[in-house]
């Protein structure tokens, strides 16, 4: 009998802590198809990661890894592991340059939480193929320090004309995927609110990204 694939969901915060984390973890558990190990201890990233189909950083913030954990995570992805970053995962590990390269971009700032429009740029991906061409959503509409387009496949962008305070202009990626060595990385900037983790479209977006990173799409 084929074993059920496992996810390691990491939610440690050394900076801002999102109130939505419990709802987010429950939502990942509820996706089905995976055994989920969720926790906050940095030591969880120091052990063998090869037994996981993907590692998920779920609204982590600040420096959350030990030096050994950084080495383990980098080697795991390079050798074929999956990595998924959700929302504040882009506000994580500023002290580790490789993490910014791994994820594709780092958080810069965000305007107030508000409704806006996400534009699905690439529908040929399990994280987006179910979405409408223009997706109405409420979130913080993260700006990033750099545009990830040069190293990543952009899936969803923000329509800055649909909300107040955007700072990246006409090309504003929100969700993307990329390959790192033999591994796969998926990131979505969405997922600030607890309500997001009850939204069927967002849950399918998250599930598709996890499946792609885990090589199960």
Image: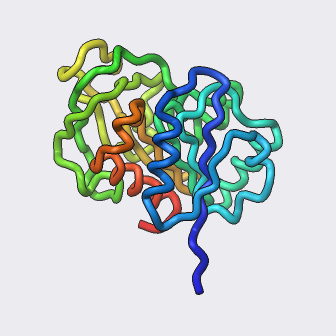
Of 19 and 151, nearer the camera is 19
Q: Is residue 153 above or below residue 96?
A: below
Residue 123 place in picture, x, y as percent? 25, 53
Considering every residue shown, the one lying at the far right of the view is 68
| Residue 168 quadrant | top left
**Where is 206 relative to 117, above or below?**
below
Q: Is residue 63 visible?
A: yes
Does residue 24 appear left or right of residue 4 in this picture? Answer: left
Q: Could you say which is closer to the camera, residue 14 or residue 180?
A: 14
Q: Is residue 169 left or right of residue 43?
A: left
Q: Residue at x 38, y 57 (%)?
A: 208
Q: Residue at x 58, y 37 (%)?
A: 101
Q: How is the image coloured?
A: rainbow
Q: Position of residue 131 (x, y in %)?
A: 23, 50
| Drawn side of residue 68 relative to residue 76, left or right | right
- Residue at 45% across, 24% down: 144
Q: Residue 45: horizontal and vertical position, in percent?
A: 74, 47
The residue lying toward the viewer, choosing from 47 and 203, is 203
- The answer to whether residue 151 is visible is no
Task: Give the percent coordinates (x, y) of residue 75.
Answer: 72, 53
Q: Split into 4 quadrants, where in the image is the C terminus?
A: bottom left
Q: Is residue 57 left or right of residue 112?
A: right
């Amino acid at each position: 009998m084929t074993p059920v694939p496992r996810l390691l969901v990491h939610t440690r915060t050394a900076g801002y802590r999102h109130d939505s984390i419990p709802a987010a973890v429950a939502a990942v558990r509820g996706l089905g198809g995976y055994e989920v190990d969720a926790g906050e201890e940095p030591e969880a990233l120091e052990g063998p990661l090869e037994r996981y189909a993907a590692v998920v950083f779920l609204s982590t913030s600040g420096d959350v890894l030990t030096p050994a954990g950084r080495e383990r995570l980098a080697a795991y992805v390079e050798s074929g592991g999956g990595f998924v970053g959700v929302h504040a995962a882009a506000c994580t590990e500023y002290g580790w340059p490789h993490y910014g390269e791994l994820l594709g971009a780092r958080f810069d700032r965000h305007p107030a939480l508000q409704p806006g429009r996400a534009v699905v740029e690439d529908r040929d991906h399990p994280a987006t193929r179910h979405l409408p061409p223009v997706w109405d959503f409420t979130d913080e509409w993260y700006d990033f320090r750099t545009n990830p387009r040069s190293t990543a496949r952009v899936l969803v962008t923000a329509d800055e004309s649909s909300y107040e305070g955007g700072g990246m202009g006409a090309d504003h990626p929100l969700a993307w995927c990329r390959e790192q060595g033999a591994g796969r990385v998926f990131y979505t900037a969405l997922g600030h609110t607890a309500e997001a983790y009850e939204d069927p479209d967002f849950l399918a977006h998250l599930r598709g990204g996890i499946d792609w990173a885990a090589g199960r799409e």
